[in-house]
Image: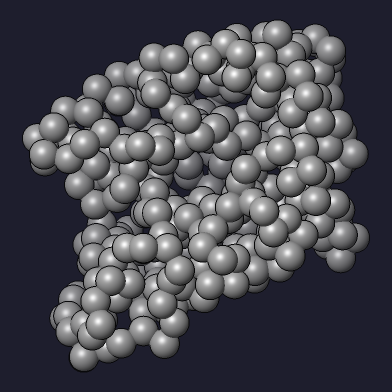
Amino acid sequence: MIRAQYPRDDDMVRRFEEICDVARLAEKLGFDCITKGMHYGASPLGDYQQIPFLARIMAEAPGCRLNAGVVLLSLHKPLDIAEQFATLDVMSKGKVILGVALGYRDLEFKAFGTTQAERVTRLEENLIAIRRLWTEERVSMTASHFELDDVSLGMRPVQKPHPPIWMGANADAAIRRAARLADCWYIPPHNRVDTVLRQLDIYRRELEALGKPFPEELPMRREVFVAANREEAMRLCGTALERKYRAYVEWGQDKPMPEGDELDLALEELTKDRFLIGSPDEVSEAILAIVRPTGVNHLIISTHWPGMETAVAMEAMQRFAEEVMPRVRSGL
């Protein structure tokens, strides 16, 4: 994941040049996919917008898949998102993943003229409409906040029947929704591993009740940092990681978390059973301990947080690729 968030007063032109270096390195090192999230009004951080970011970054890493992880779908209209991502899919020759989620910040809902009370209905309606627009020649549909009157897309995606749809979800009810509406549950970085194992049981039971198979691709995002040892890793990444999670708490990300899985914690407590930080051996074993019981087969790693020098993040990426990837593949 190229989070691409920086302190507001940073040189964002220079930072984007560095981001392009990161994307090129990711493809060179054998990473399969590049992920970018979505937020608006990201103060106290500066943040590049997702769709133009992905459109530009595909030129730097043309072999990588492009994961929109996630689109805050409740804020948007389905015709716009369907055409934007169909266009990205064509431009990338069929490498786009559409990740979606509800969102949780009042600031964003107010700015887009909606409310948190409407977000579930809007997300569900939008997702139904996007699937139909991608797979049907013409679509008519009346919903709470849009009307499609015999609409045909101006651009159709390359992937058939459509690009993969992942749904991010923290809470148990949202995981049931992911089973019902999405191609897979996109497991978030914030939930502790013990919470994820419990919630996977909920996900499996919901899939069974719906008569749906377990997905072939099960993605999970984690905060990851590799150095010579854990002490050195925490020295290099701790301040930036703590800054990012303070911003999450200020934004309200702690509110939709499962009961007992808190984010407003001191750094050492926050990292326990949640983030993968340490030596190559420690991180490899921690990944294997997650993927073996869960079936996760697409791990999205974040190694760069606001305020961290890009060179430090790139060194951790290289160490991950050269020392962790082979150990994990061997362990599997």
Name the residue located 19 percent from the left edge and 75 percent from the top edge: 144
Residue 230, placed above or below residue 147? above
Residue in view at x 29 percent, y 50 percent: 182
User: Residue 64: percent from the left, percent from the top?
Assistant: 64, 51
Picture layout, residue 330 above or below residue 38: above
Q: Is residue 25 left or right of residue 131?
A: right
Report the residue at 62% width, 57% height from top. 42
Name which quarter of the figure residue 95 lies in: bottom right
Q: Position of residue 252 (x, y in %)?
A: 48, 44
In the displayed structure, 231 sits above or below 31; it is above
Q: Is residue 62 left or right of residue 261?
A: right
Q: Position of residue 47 (x, y in %)?
A: 69, 59
**Left or right: 140, with 264 as reference point:** left
Tell me the colour scheme of the image.
one colour
Q: Which quadrant of the rendered structure holds the N terminus? A: top right
Toward which corner of the image does residue 60 lie, by quadrant?
A: bottom right
Q: Residue at x 37, y 48 (%)?
A: 167
Most foreground residue, 225 or 251? 225
Location of residue 227 (image quadrant): top right
Residue 317 seen in this snapshot: yes
Depth check: give the residue in front, 68 or 216.
216
